Image (spheres, grey):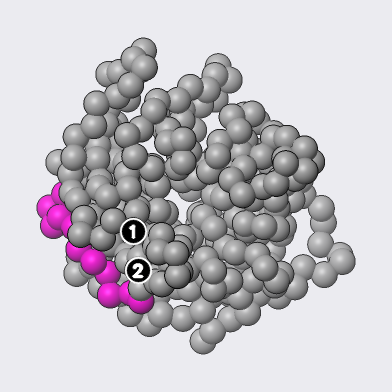
């Protein structure tokens, strides 16, 4: 049954995130935590660049990418899966940690016959694959984007989901059989049943409708209680939705364009963006494009799923 998000009201406790990394990405996205490296990884789609932050040492660095970097996945063997514009690639950053650039190995082409789409949001499923969407860059806003699954043993398969303009919020519950996703301009998050073996979905329904006008859902992550944390572009906040769609908490950021959350124990990390902000907005939000963090009262983090790479 479709659900609408309850409003936050005036009695909800205040939660606020603070700046961690002042990287000022044009379009920071796809942040995730690698437990093997004890590091955060994220993309600056427009630079384009892959970022790495060593949590223990407090050091950040980046590698340039040859095309817009939309999504990142952790490989079971330590390599990374990267979604770059029109294709999926893998890379071993550990072998090239001291290098200024990293060599990429191509795995699959994606919508290569359509120059006005590019890979956007994506996340590993719980079965060794990755699900991602492609963004439409047509001037008329037509929904030319699609959703795909990639598995090393099955290759690239399109999911039977409606075409999208800006696919986002892709994440999975603990069972791996329920998938969340959205087309950001629609202002709602959907969910469906997900069959990883068949690359099929069914029972699509509305999970939540955002309770603020002119705000778009961006990246999401599911925590260890199967609640969904969603970064809300234009609202300067991350909202935690319980499995029944009710708002549990709102974490405010000092920037208006948070883009993607990840959870590590009790800490929420959030990427953000500067793109599209006016000079006056950038004066008010000098750290836009940075990475922000918020410490909760208990651990919500769930280990990031990994992709089996060829």
The mark found on residue 228 in the picture is none
Relative to residue 164, is residue 243 drawn left or right?
right
Residue occupying image coordinates x 25% and y 48%: 87
Q: Is residue 62 above or below residue 48?
A: above
Tally of marks: 2
**Mark 1 neighbour class, 10 Å CA radius: few under 14, some 14 to 19, many 20 or more:** some
Image height of 230 relative to 52, above or below:
below
Query: Callout 2: helix, strand or loop?
Result: loop
Whether residue 33 is visible to the viewer of this picture, yes or no, is no
Residue 156 higher or lower than 144, as above or below: above
**Residue 200: x and y, percent?**
25, 73
Q: Measuring 35% from the left and 53% from the top, which residue is drawn there?
A: 119
Question: Which residue occupies 40% across, 47% down?
Answer: 70
Q: In which quarter of the image is residue 140?
A: bottom left
For disc 1, the marked residue is: 116
Q: In the rendered structure, does residue 174 fall within the stretch colored magenta?
A: no
**Which residues, given as a range, are shown in magenta?**
151-162
Q: Distance between the residues labelled 1 and 2?
A: 8 Å
Q: Is mark 1 on a helix, strand or loop?
A: loop
Q: Position of residue 143 (x, y in %)?
A: 39, 71
Front residue of 33/210: it is 210
Question: Can residue 238 be seen in the rendering of this structure?
Answer: yes
Q: Does residue 161 show up magenta in the picture?
A: yes
| First in sequence: mark 1 vs mark 2 | 1
* Front residue of this view, candidates 284 and 2: 284
**Quadrant in the picture for residue 294:** top right
Would you name the residue on which mark 2 appears? 144
Query: Residue 310 location, x and y as percent?
Result: 14, 41
Depth check: give the residue in front, 222 or 99.
99
Asked if the residues shown at circle 1 and circle 2 are in contact, with their CB atoms under 8 angstroms apart, the answer is yes
Q: Position of residue 37 (x, y in %)?
A: 41, 26
């Amino acid at each position: 049954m479709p659900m609408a998000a309850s409003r936050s009201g005036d009695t909800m406790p205040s939660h606020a995130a603070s700046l961690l990394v002042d990287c000022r990405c044009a379009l920071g996205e796809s942040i995730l935590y690698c437990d093997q490296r004890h590091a955060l990884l994220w993309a600056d789609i427009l630079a384009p660049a892959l970022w790495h932050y060593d949590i223990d040492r407090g050091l950040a660095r980046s590698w340039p990418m040859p095309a817009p970097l939309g999504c990142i996945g952790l490989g079971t063997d330590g390599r990374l899966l990267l979604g770059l514009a029109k294709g999926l690639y893998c890379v071993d950053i550990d072998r090239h940690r001291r290098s200024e650039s990293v060599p990429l190995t191509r795995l699959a082409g994606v919508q290569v016959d359509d120059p006005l789409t590019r890979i956007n949001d994506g996340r590993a499923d719980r079965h060794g694959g990755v699900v991602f969407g492609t963004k439409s860059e047509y001037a008329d806003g037509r929904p030319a984007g699609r959703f795909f699954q990639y598995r090393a043993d099955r290759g690239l398969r399109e999911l039977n989901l409606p075409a999208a303009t800006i696919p986002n919020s892709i994440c999975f519950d603990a069972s791996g059989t329920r998938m969340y996703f959205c087309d950001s301009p629609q202002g709602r998050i959907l969910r469906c049943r997900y069959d990883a073996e068949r690359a099929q979905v069914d029972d699509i329904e509305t999970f939540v409708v955002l309770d603020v006008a002119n705000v778009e859902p961006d990246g999401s992550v599911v925590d260890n209680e199967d609640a969904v944390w969603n970064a809300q572009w234009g609202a300067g906040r991350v909202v935690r939705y319980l499995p029944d769609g009710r708002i549990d908490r709102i974490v405010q950021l000092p920037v208006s364009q948070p883009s993607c959350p990840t959870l590590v124990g009790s800490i929420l990390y959030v990427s953000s963006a500067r793109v599209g902000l006016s000079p006056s907005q950038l004066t008010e939000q000098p750290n836009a494009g940075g990475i922000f963090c918020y410490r909760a009262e208990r651990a919500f983090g769930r280990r990031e799923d990994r992709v089996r790479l060829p």
